[in-house]
Image: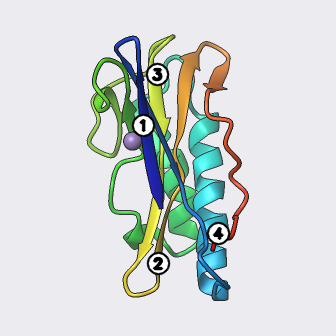
Amino acid sequence: MVDAGALVDGYCADCTRTFATGALPDRLKDAYAVCLEGQEAGLQSVRTGTTGIEADANARTVIDQAGFGEQFGHGLGHGVGIDVHEAPRLSRESSDTLAANNVVTVEPGIYLPGEGGIRIEDLVVVTDDGPEILTSFTKDLETVV
Ligand SMILES: [Mn+2]
């Protein structure tokens, strides 16, 4: 798992990708696919007026229904700007609502003790029409050695 950031002209970026380091058991391949499906559901819910609770729930439902809910132990995402972690929060406890031009992360994770962990994080601009995804790095499951 590689969580990388950047700082340009006083503003932060945040990106996470997960790579395989060899042949994976089916359970980890499945977990990767579920994490990505949950991330896509979370991304598609990012628009003006969505609450942080709703965005989190849209991703979490996918992961819950696949049986990995207990292994997704953190919030879906957070605002990014002058600080790398700031409002609005996308989580079960959030009291925030997304506003146009907020920049947020969408980063579900599934962590299987003793087996492996997965997190997939994109940086997204909130618009009235949906997500403007800033992260272009592939989300295909890549093997690195
Ligand atoms: Mn992050």
How many C-alpha atoms fall within 10 Å of the one at disc 1: few (<14), some, or many (≥20)? few
| Image position, residue 67 (x, y; %) | 52, 75
Of tags 2 and 4, which is closer to the observer? 4
Q: Is residue 119 left or right of residue 77?
A: right
| Image position, residue 119 (x, y; %) | 49, 58
- The amino acid type, in three-letter code, at marker 4 is Val
| Residue assigned mark 4 | 144
How many C-alpha atoms fall within 10 Å of the one at disc 2: few (<14), some, or many (≥20)? some
- For residue 117, above or below residue 46: below
Instruction: Confirm or reject: label 1 Cβ below 8 Å from ligand 1.
Output: no
The residues tagged by marks 2 and 4 sit, at their Cα atoms, a distance apart of 15 Å
Of tags 1 and 3, which is closer to the observer? 1
- For residue 119, above or below residue 111: above
The residues tagged by marks 3 and 4 sit, at their Cα atoms, a distance apart of 30 Å
> Label 3's element?
strand
> Label 1's element?
strand
Q: Which mark is residue 116?
A: 2
Of tags 3 and 4, which is closer to the observer? 4
| Residue assigned mark 1 | 5
| Residue assigned mark 3 | 103
Q: How many marks?
A: 4
Quarter holding residue 70: bottom left
